[in-house]
Amino acid sequence: MTGFITPQGYTILTANASSTTGGALSATISGPSNGTPGRSVYLSGFSYQCTGATTATNISITIQYFNAAGGVTFTSGFVYPIVGTAGAVQAPMVINLDPPLSSPQVQTGIASGAGPGVGSINISTTSAGAAATVCALNVWGYML
């Protein structure tokens, strides 16, 4: 997290996911074992990159936080275009959030209805499609 101003007492959080079949991806940042009670999760940024597929499409990227009932969507306004050339290398999309996006709910140490701990932040993508042989999602932030 070089270049980011982080407060004293923070813990760096990272997560990643990848696919060799163009499948949907999902990565969640939180403290250990469903989160550290009383601490908040902050999303500082994410990156996504994928090769082209057999059919051009747009990937939707969604950011969610988790409450006791499950996932609640912050935003689904990020789009990554996939070209219709199988295996073509594409530029990465890198989003740095300044200020960081905080989960509106502190971690409780209890799993949500959707699985990840209450207060966690998740980023997920839709499928890139057939012949998209290398797709990667990286997420970074901190816990305070």
Image (cartoon, helix red, strand yellow):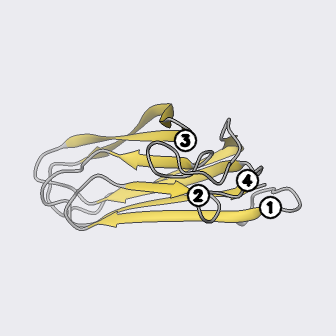
Left or right? Give the position of 111 relative to 82.
right
The answer to whether the residues at label 1 and label 2 have Cβ atoms under 8 Å apart is no
Q: Which of disc 1 and disc 4 is earlier in sequence?
A: 1
Q: Secondary structure at mark 3?
A: strand
Residue drawn where x is 40% and y is 63% of the image:
17
Residue linked to disc 4: 37
| Front of the two marks 1 and 2 | 2
Residue 133's tag is none
Residue 66's tag is 3
Check disc 1 and give the amino acid type.
Answer: Tyr
Q: Which of disc 3 and disc 1 is earlier in sequence?
A: 1
Label 1: how many Cα within 10 Å (few below 14, some 14–19, many 20+): some
Single out the residue that lies furthest toward the right.
Answer: 8
Frontmost residue, 13 versus 96 = 13
Left or right? Give the position of 2 relative to 127.
right
Per the model, the C-alpha gap separating discs 1 and 2 is: 17 Å
Residue drawn where x is 29% and y is 52% of the image:
24
Label 2: how many Cα within 10 Å (few below 14, some 14–19, many 20+): some
Residue 10's tag is 1
Residue 34's tag is 2
Q: Which of disc 3 and disc 4 is earlier in sequence?
A: 4
| Front of the two marks 4 and 3 | 4
Total numbered labels placed on residues in the image: 4
Q: Secondary structure at mark 2?
A: loop
Per the model, the C-alpha gap separating discs 2 and 3 is: 11 Å
